[in-house]
Image: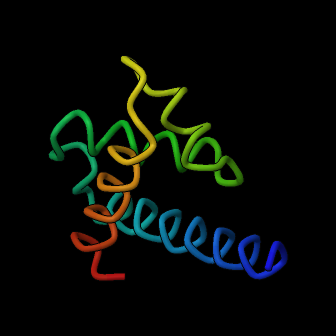
Amino acid sequence: ADHANLVRTSRAAQLQLEAAQRLRAEGRLERLPVPLREAAELRLRHPANSLRELAARSDPAASKAAMHRRLRRLEELAGT
């Protein structure tokens, strides 16, 4: 179960990273609302961090759930 969770978390982080990279490459990152842009920038700078770690790095600190919603929205916007 622990291994499965690690694999699932790693895949999710990879998809989030790809979404942020796509939005940046398309020039759409700068036009996002600040919370979404910050989530994307945090994922780009810290690709291996957990949701909890990214949320703690947010300014102001966000909840894990809020960070999850922001990263999920980035994936939707990027079409990943």
Quarter location, residue 63: top left
Q: How is the image coloured?
A: rainbow
Quadrant holding the N terminus: bottom right
Q: Is residue 13 left or right of residue 76?
A: right
Q: Is residue 75 left or right of residue 53?
A: left
Residue 32: x and y in percent read 18, 46
In the rendered image of this protein, does residue 69 appear above or below residue 75? above
Quarter location, residue 22: bottom left
Residue drawn at x 71%, y 73% is 5
Residue 8: x and y in percent read 65, 78
Q: Is residue 51 left or right of residue 80?
A: right
Quadrant holding the C terminus: bottom left
Residue 37: x and y in percent read 30, 42
Residue drawn at x 42%, y 22% is 61
Quarter location, residue 46: top right
Tag count: 0
Residue drawn at x 67%, y 47% is 49
Residue 74: x and y in percent read 30, 62
In the rendered image of this protein, does residue 61 appear above or below residue 13? above
